[in-house]
Amino acid sequence: MAGQTLYDKLWASHLVSSRDDGTSLIYIDRHLLHEVTSPQAFEGLRLADRRPWRIDANIATADHNVPTSLKERSAGIAGIEDNVSRIQVQTLDDNTTSFGIETFGINDVRQGIVHIIGPEQGATLPGMTVVCGDSHTATHGAFGALAHGIGTSEVEHVLATQCLIQRKMKNMQVRVEGQLGLHVTAKDIVLAIIGEIGTAGGTGYAIEFAGSAIRDLSMEGRMTICNMAIEAGARVGLVAVDDTTINYVKGRPFAPTPEQWDAAVESWRSLVSDDDAAFDKVVTLDAAAIEPQVSWGTSPEMVVGIHGSVPDPAAAEDETTRRGLGRALEYMGLHAGQKITDIRLDRVFIGSCTNARIEDLRAAAAVVKGREVAGSIKQAMVVPGSGLVKRQAEQEGLDQVFIDAGFEWREAGCSMCLAMNADKLGAGEHCASTSNRNFEGRQGYGGRTHLVSPAMAAAAAVTGHFVDVREFVDTPVPTKRAAGL
Amino acid sequence: MKAFVRQKGLVAPLDRANVDTDLIIPKQFLKSIKRTGFGPNLFDELRYLDEGYPGQDCSNRPINPEFVLNQLRYEGASVLLARKNFGCGSSREHAPWALEDFGFRVIIAPSFADIFFNNAFKNGLLLIQLDEATVDRLFDAVEQTPGYRLDVDLIAQKIMTPEGEAIEFEVDPFRKYCLENGLDDIGLTLTDNSHAIREFETRHRASQPWLFRGEAANQA
């Protein structure tokens, strides 16, 4: 018998029951809640006179439409100026209070983007099933946890039953072998993967990311990769457990107690695909060949290396694709054959569940240090992924590096990734963004998003257009600033 | 959830691939704490020429006359014909809520994104996956025939075209059962599986106690 994949193992260890029709009931260990996709689920519970099955499996925080300015945040929920947003954040607070669910309030230092605070608190553990009413829940798969996004009906189902009705997915392995170039990051890997397999390439699959380049990544980098599995169409992204995983988890608030630790580690060591495991599909990429990536269009698969150009729709293989490319070019205000380095930018956003962890901020700060945001950039902002990331960055002096360069230093939240709060693009504006989606209108009505790594976003902020960060870092820092004057 | 058994409905064609959930219902409308009322903002950025905001009266907004759902010949459509990877992007259930609220009951496409597919069935929408060639053919027929209607029969798993052709489709038996009976699957899970869930939980807690922080389940 062939061995099991990591996904097969996680599935089997959470299987409550199976039906003849191919559906199964899967037990859920961790449920993360936020303000946008939960109110209707809590309402449904109340209408049916149901209680949450297991309170301690749930953790909540408001992230999607919290303001990121200190002025609004300092007054707590009452300080949120947008009435509709305030009601939604208040509703989460009311719901979790009335059901007794642990919540990191808007001014708790542990508040932040759900997919950042879960791992940060140790509330995401290897071997768990983790769900949240948000498609970027795939992030938690970096820990060898079976994690995926769900809709509001399923949020209600998990609250009421601690389970989900699922069908087993197929197994895909994406192997990234070899060594990444200097300043080429996890974000570039995942964008290159999406460029290769397309936004529907992973539909119906759980993707395990493997290979030496993945093993060499930190947990932050692995989270960035799994985070965007959904942009490749896969609800689930996974990375096998190793020492990097275990060392990250150790000592975190929700991690196993010292008495439980050895048994937990022993159990986690089995969370790898067996050598003889069979995958339905395998894709291999050469890490050394990956350039810093920039998306030019309105779908994450519309992405090229920094030295590439905007494609010509006339070269597309079918009519639907040709029209899609043409529409994307028109929306983005670009022309076929335009060099990526010629795209001028209006705003820069460093943040989101993809790239707002401490390592991301360090990478961006290293590029920015001693330099200034270009005069042509209307706004450059850094939005840390959590209150704790923000505090750590401040302890390391990164906030000052950004502020000195002309960046805004904000409070934690989803912010301009999806522009549900006041942080948004104006119509026609181009933004270098470390987020995950470049859909039409995603960052604001008529806004034009280019997905990049934190280092690439930082370099673009300084030059005002896209530039190869590998070359940019070698350019001299202005002497006045280098001398600290 | 509204039951779906059989429906003969006008077909509206949305001829673009990778329609994402941001396009189906833009984020500003996700601030609502209700499940209803999203219909007027379905495809907001395509339907109107201005930027919409929550709570607005949409009847006075400038309409984009080129957008398919604004064309008189598709008024009252309940079947949406779409291209591949429909519903990609975020997990927002507001997308199926908006489609259902607008009046759609059936969506036909060569492929759908996973989370959207799941969400749609939980809201009384029937999603039908057909091969690209058949979808192409339907696009042509809709374009050429004003008032083109399809008769969609969930029980028989067949679509009858006006030309008299029967197109068969697949549907997951459990989803079909829930849809034809308008059933809420939470009730089903609790009725059929409460005991199994509790047993599983007891074993799980014994083998991996670090996954649990509180006391045993409080469900009566």
Image (tube, rainbow, N blue to C red):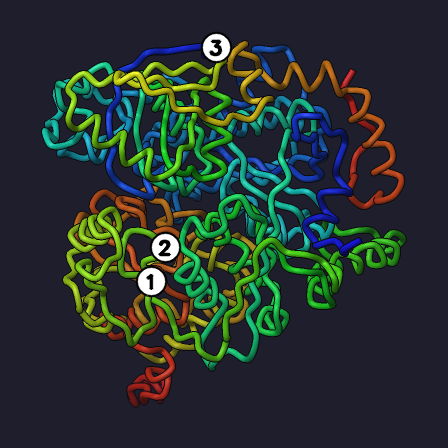
Q: Could you tell me the amino acid type at mark 2?
A: Pro
Give the answer, above or below, for where B181 lies relative to A252.
above
Give the answer, above or below, for where A254 lies relative to B56.
below
Q: Is residue A410 left or right of residue A135?
A: left
* Number of residues whose C-alpha sits closer than 10 Å to that of mark 3, classed few (under 14), some (14–19) or many (20 or more): some
Specify the subunit that label 1 lies on.
A
Q: Is residue B29 left or right of residue A260?
A: left
- The residue indicated by pointer 3 is B3
Q: Nearer the viewer, residue B207 or A365?
A: B207
Residue under disc 3 on the same chain as residue under disc 1? no
Residue at 32% x, 61% y: name it.
A295
Residue at 35% x, 80% y: name it.
A370
Which corner quadrant holds the C terminus of chain A? bottom left
* Number of residues whose C-alpha sits closer than 10 Å to that of mark 2, classed few (under 14), some (14–19) or many (20 or more): many
Figure quadrant of residue B205: top right
Q: Nearer the viewer, residue A481 or A443?
A: A443
Q: Secondary structure at mark 3?
A: loop
- Residue B85, image x and y in percent? 39, 41
The mark closer to the camera, 2 or 3, is 3
Residue A300 shows which numbered tag? 2
- The residue indicated by pointer 1 is A303
